[in-house]
Image (cartoon, rainbow, N blue to C red):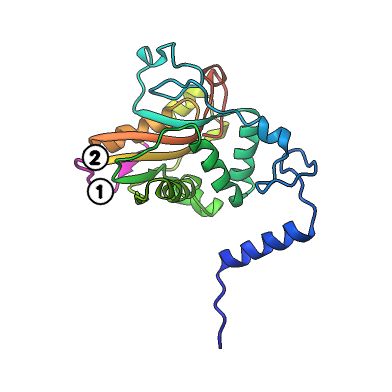
Amino acid sequence: MPINISLSGIGRLANAIREDFLPIHCLLCNSACDRPNRLCDKCDDDIRINIWPCPCCAAPGQVLVAHCAATTAPCKVHAGLEYGGVVRELIHRWKFNRAADLTGFLVRRALTTVPRIAGFDAMVPVPMHWRKRWYRGYNQSEVLARVLSRELQLQSGVRVPVKNLLRAKGRPTAQHLMNRRQRHQSVEDRYTACAPLEGQSILVVDDVLTTGQTIRAVAHCIAGAGATRVEAWCLARAPLAANKGKAHPR
């Protein structure tokens, strides 16, 4: 009789064997720990929650500054973590070292400080050019969107489908190597909608918001396709001071 074992089941079995028979070390500082997410107490405590964010662009600490009165946000942004320190290291490990088992942990931590999100027709991940996706093997924004959809369904019982409704053109230079001006130029007219979105409410999903140029371009594209409501959800938001003249992963 054939035995049908999924790859995900094999992965869970391997993790269980590792945790039962091998010592667990913190993913970041390599000290011994017994936490299920494999972070020691110190590193876990150093995760920066996005406290008092701007109600429009989610910039950390900007709730009373009216930051977006001067720099209008393209859409309302939800971001539960502040990008820097331990959060930055975790996202880099998750994104560039293929630590897929961190996805659920990061999403759940980000959701602890973000109000319940509801009323959307679809979650749309920020797309990658097909060549970059082929090279990396996956689109991290799509992975986030699928885990976010699952976690929100557990909260509310309502499933918001994840739909790849956008296409992205290629660019000559990797985004994490660009400065702010180059990033602004690179996203102009980069995204196109695959289908009309008349009257729909769309939640854009991405990993990190830094300068905001990517979200601005995506929101403009979705609104141009007819959507009546566009908001964005990100794992983390970079502080405003960190954006001046520096390059970031996204």
Residue beneath the point at 45% across and 32% down: 114
Residue 161: x percent and y percent? 35, 51
Q: Is residue 133 left or right of residue 29?
A: left
In this view, the residue in front, 9 or 236, is: 9
Residue tagged 1: 195
Using a 10 Å C-alpha cutoff, classify the residue at mark 2 as few (fewer than 14 neighbours), some (14 to 19) or many (20 or more): some
Using a 10 Å C-alpha cutoff, classify the residue at mark 1 as few (fewer than 14 neighbours), some (14 to 19) or many (20 or more): few
Residue 93 in which image quadrant: top right
**Secondary structure beneath disc 2?**
loop
In this view, the residue in front, 218 or 110, is: 110
Report if residue 191 lies within the magenta region: yes
Residue tagged 2: 225
Residue 170: x percent and y percent? 44, 43
In this view, the residue in front, 90 or 189, is: 90
Tell me, for residue 31, which label it has, or none: none
Q: Amino acid at mark 1?
A: Ala
Q: How many marks?
A: 2
Residue 245: x percent and y percent? 55, 19
Residue beneath the point at 42% across and 28% down: 213
**Secondary structure beneath disc 1?**
loop
Of the 4 image quadrants, the one containing the N terminus is bottom right
Q: State the extent of the magenta-drawn residues as a range.
A: 190-200
Task: Give the main secondary structure, helix, strand or loop, of the magenta stretch.
Answer: loop
Q: Amino acid at mark 2?
A: Ala
Is there a contact, CB below 8 Å, between mark 1 and mark 2? Answer: yes
Residue 184 in which image quadrant: top left
Residue 193: x percent and y percent? 29, 44
